[in-house]
Amino acid sequence: MSSPQSPTFTLDEFALDPAKLAKSAIKGIRLAFGISGAVALILGVVLLFWPTKTLAVVAIFLGINFLITGAIKVALGIFTYGLSAGMRILDILFGLILLVAGIVAIKNSAATGEVLLIFTVIIIGIGWIIEGILAIVESGKTASRTWAVVFGGLSIVAGIVVLVVPTWSALWLLLITGISLVILGVLGIVRAITFGRGVLSNLS
């Protein structure tokens, strides 16, 4: 007598597939991508042209970015219907991690010298790596997968770069952070435009 086969687990259970989502869910996810992308783009531009180039500015702006991104992820996990249970749990979990990172970054922005430099590097690196992993996991096999993978890959690379080079000066850290935010912001907006576009056009 053959034993029943146990269900097979795949990463596709965590993927965002527009074809399986309601129209409202697709619009909510596109809005989330657009908001987080626009915030990253604006903060990146501000960091690049901010007259007072200090680590405190970097820490505060990164904290704001993580707070907004984390809040969006948590909201998606709680209020977006049509997502798998695994995807909702993953969104909420990573969202909470980013929220904590944002709060810690802002609360410790008053620190000085080497302590703040090391702390800021760790927050930036871990935050971007988390965002990148989540983007790749969500990408699935959809038409917009390419942009999600590019965003996730660049986010992970940017996170690793700042973590493995802990001796960045404040000026270089500011420059790398600003450029990375601008690139990730643009990619986030592109993801918002491309995600589920074909599905929405068929539904309309």
Image: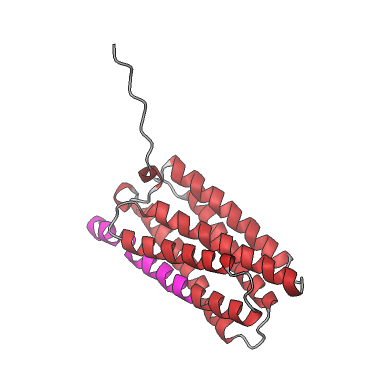
The image quadrant of residue 169 is: bottom right
The image quadrant of residue 125 is: bottom right
Q: Position of residue 196 (x, y in %)?
A: 31, 58
- Asked if the stretch drawn in magenta spans residue 195, the answer is yes
Residue at image position (25%, 55%) is 203
Q: What stretch is highlighted in magenta?
A: 182-204
Above-or-below relation of 84 to 59: above
Please say which color scheme the image uses: secondary structure
Q: Position of residue 38 (x, y in %)?
A: 48, 72
Q: Does the magenta stretch mainly form a helix, a strand or a loop?
A: helix
Residue lying furthest left in this view?
202
Residue at image position (48%, 53%) is 76
Q: Can residue 180 be seen in this view?
A: yes
Seen from the viewer's position, the closer of residues 179 and 98 is: 179
- Asked if the stretch drawn in magenta spans residue 166, the answer is no
If the image is split into quadrants, where does the N terminus sit?
top left
The image quadrant of residue 105 is: bottom right
Left or right: where does residue 202 sit relative to residue 120? left
